Image: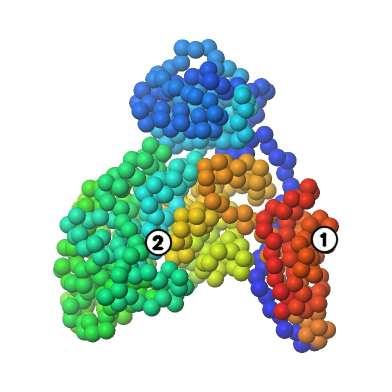
Amino acid sequence: MKRAIVLLGIFLITLFVPAQQNKVSFIPQPESIEIKEGAFHLNNETQVFIPSKYYEDLKGIVTTKLANDTGFNFTAKKGKSKSTSNYIVFQKSKASEIKPEGYILEISAKKITIKAKDYGGMFNGFQTLRQAIPVEQSKETKIPSMIVNDNPRFGWRGVLADVSRHFHSKEFLMKQIDVLSAYKINTFHIHLTDDQGWRIEIKKYPKLTEKGAWRADREGVHWWSRKPATAEEPKTVGGFYTQEDLKSIIEYARVRNVEIIPEIDVPGHSKALVASYPELFCSDIDTIGVNFEVAVGGKAPNNTVCPASEFTYQFIEGVIEEIAALFPSKYIHIGGDECSKKDWKKSELCKQLMEENGLKDYEELQSYFIQRIHKIVEKQNKIMIGWDEVLSGNGVPGATIMAWRRGKYTPEIQAPREGYPTIMTSYLHSYISRVQGPTFIEPEGPNSVLPLSVVYNHEPVPSELTPEEASRVLGNQASLWGEFTPTGEHFEYMLYPRTLASAEVSWSNPKLKSWQRFQDALEFTHFKRLEKEGVNFAKSLFTVYPAFGIDQLHNKAIVYLETEAVGYDIYYTLDGSEPSLEATKYEGNFTAVPKSLLKAGLFNKDGELLGQITELRLK
């Protein structure tokens, strides 16, 4: 029998037994939770006590967030409580079971105590307390009595925000830092430069933002179909952060236990840099036909700086000096990924440099460049981070690797095995720029899908590593590239809730993970919390994925439906009407007349549509 099968996209997930909804729903899941009898009654009379060392940083966050969460007004005082009941107290603790950024949260009828060894632990314990507070406000808020013992799995719990491809304001980034820190994300990696825009003020080189921060408007054209800009047309799309802006972001993040990691991308992904200062391009290459304008989309030829020019290193050193002085983080990310060697191969200067230094190929030439940049970073008493491409050639001993590729390269195994501290941000599991539902339903993005459940079920430490090698894994990061996020609303839609899944991967013991529990926590509690914070989030986990094949011999369509959410039923129609509980319940694959209009949705037992309707013509 000859059949023509047309698959439009389906994935398989593991089904879990539905779990009973808990009184409290935490994300990320704590190490241990012991629910006790009784409850703490939070009200306008509740007092807050904070140790003197942390008072100035914590008081504003604690009182403001508690007020927003409950509707009550709070004041904070320094030191220990002299009250006998109705108070919240933060305590410095030397308990051996508390690790850096860990905490013990004790809630009883009389008081709430948050014990920690450091500021990060107190902040994280407070965020867990906030999640124990009911979302709905009332005249008196009851918090169940409990003891929570909690420590992070990884020290690096990150999110990358690409603001080069599309610029987002200082205030917008602060909003994301505030939301992410509530889920114990402690590292915010800002991709500040790329082919499509330079976003950081460098006072020594003003043209980086005078020219490099702006590009011609092609926003109505698909990212990969945009024609290059001409020198004459106006450059109106873009923006940049002044150093004062960045100081504000850094301080805002600091009090939320978040470290800002700056990234400038060299030697490739540097079209905005080369457009601003063409002398960074190899001077012996014929530049007839070379476009020295900031890239407007995905196509960005001639986007590498010259590794055979001393001016290149002097220039980058000037940039790194200002970045090192501005950012208190011990890390500076220098990119190093996806570097085209096409222009280098045309350069006699590059060939001469290779001969003089015994470099056998252009991968080793890139290693030479990266190693020199590494020395510049070290000179500023910083640690260099590079994407895993910096492992090629001769590598760069002493650097930290951000591993994103899999397949034959396996850098997430290679890097820690070769002794490199490694941060995992797998393309397959953590690149949340990929759409999170069926591509024909989701907003415009790459033609690949990364569902929420795949992010959640990711294990960032490869099983092939020995315990010693695994100890070099610093943590996990979700990365949002900005090609398809021109608006803040779209940016948030891609961030949430997948960054919450990544937060649990980064914080919680993997043995504690449960997709059913996480799904319920989102649906019944955390979607409401995000809504309260004014966040635009996706509900794509409730979307129905369709796939079908055409049996040409028997003139029928064979239809399969799937969803990553568990515990609910799919209902569908084939006549164009809207599905409901009165429609046909999906019990397994079925046949239909070709060209029928399929409409399917996921419903709870009350008949409420949980996501959006999937609509597909079977042809």
Mark 2 touches mark 1? (CB < 8 Å): no
Q: Badge 2, how many Cα within 10 Å: few under 14, some, many 20+? A: many
Tell me which residue sits at (18%, 78%) in the image: 283
> Pointer 1: what residue?
583
Q: Which amino acid does label 2 sit on?
A: His
Name which of mark 2 and mark 1 comes first in the sequence.
Answer: 2
Residue 265 at least partly seen: no
Tell me which residue sits at (52%, 42%) in the image: 533
Tell me which residue sits at (62%, 57%) in the image: 540
Secondary structure beneath disc 2?
loop
Where does residue 376 sit, x and y in percent of width and height?
A: 21, 57
Quadrant housing the N terminus = bottom right
Q: Which disc number belongs to residue 166?
A: 2
Tell me which residue sits at (40%, 61%) in the image: 166
Distance from Cα at disc 2 to Cα at disc 1? 43 Å
Where does residue 300 sit, x and y in percent of width and height?
A: 35, 74
Q: Is residue 574 left or right of residue 146?
A: right
Q: Which amino acid does label 1 sit on?
A: Ala
Q: Badge 1, how many Cα within 10 Å: few under 14, some, many 20+? A: some
Instruction: Tell me where residue 581 sits by quadrant.
Output: bottom right
Q: Is residue 413 left or right of residue 611?
A: left
Where does residue 306 sit, x and y in percent of width and height?
A: 23, 73
Secondary structure beneath disc 1?
loop
Q: In this view, does 3 lie above or below 580?
A: below
Q: Is residue 242 above or below residue 7?
A: above
